[in-house]
Image: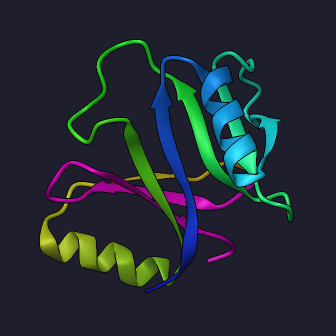
C-alpha cells in the first residue's frame, strides 16, 4: 500500500459561502458546486487550476467533533488489498464505500479521532 498524494481536506463550517469566499480569494481557488448534488448553501468544493477539489466545505450546525473543524483528510492511495490486510491484522475499525462510479473509499480513524479517507482509483 502506498500513499500517492493528499487528495483533499474536508472542513466543517457554519457559513459555507463565507468560507468558500475566503479560500477562493486567499488561495486563488475556484468555487464549484459539489458533485453529489448538494445545494451550494450546504456544500462547496474549492478547486485548483486543474479542476481538482482540494478543499471540501460542508455546513455543520452542531459543535465540531473532537478534531475541531477538520472532518477528515483524504489520501490518494494504491494497494487496497495490502491496506485492508493491515487494518484487519491491527484490529482497526474501518468501513468501505464502493460507488458505481469513482474511487473505492476506505474510512478509518487515527488515535486522535481524525477520520482518514483512503481513496483507491482503479485498484
Q: With respect to residue 14, does 24 lie above or below? A: below
Residue at 31% across, 56% down: 108
Q: Between 106 and 71, which is closer to the camera in this rendering?
A: 71
Residue 74 in the image: state x and y as whole percent: 50, 59
Residue at 13% across, 65% down: 91
Q: Between 100 and 75, which is closer to the camera in this rendering?
A: 75
Image side of residue 91 versus residue 69, left or right: left
Residue at 56% across, 28% down: 58
Q: How many marks?
A: 0
Q: With respect to residue 58, does 62 lie above or below? A: above
Q: Between 22 and 15, which is closer to the camera in this rendering?
A: 22
Image side of residue 118 versus residue 66, left or right: right
- Residue 119 forms part of the magenta stretch: yes
Q: Which residues are magenta?
A: 101-123
Q: With respect to residue 11, does 119 lie above or below? A: below
Report the quarter where the C terminus lies: bottom right
Q: With respect to residue 71, does 65 lie above or below? A: above
Amino acid at each position: 500500500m502506498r500513499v500517492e498524494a493528499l487528495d483533499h481536506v474536508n472542513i466543517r463550517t457554519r457559513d459555507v459561502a463565507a468560507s468558500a469566499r475566503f479560500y477562493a480569494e486567499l488561495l486563488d481557488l475556484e468555487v464549484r458546486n459539489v458533485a453529489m448534488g448538494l445545494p451550494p448553501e450546504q456544500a462547496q468544493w474549492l478547486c485548483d487550476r486543474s479542476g481538482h477539489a482540494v478543499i471540501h466545505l460542508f455546513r455543520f450546525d452542531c459543535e465540531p467533533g473532537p478534531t475541531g473543524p477538520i472532518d477528515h483528510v483524504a489520501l490518494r492511495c494504491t494497494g487496497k488489498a495490502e491496506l485492508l490486510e493491515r487494518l484487519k491484522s491491527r484490529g482497526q475499525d474501518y468501513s468501505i464505500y464502493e460507488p458505481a462510479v469513482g474511487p473505492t473509499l476506505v474510512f478509518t480513524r487515527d488515535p486522535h479521532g481524525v477520520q482518514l479517507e483512503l481513496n483507491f482509483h482503479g485498484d
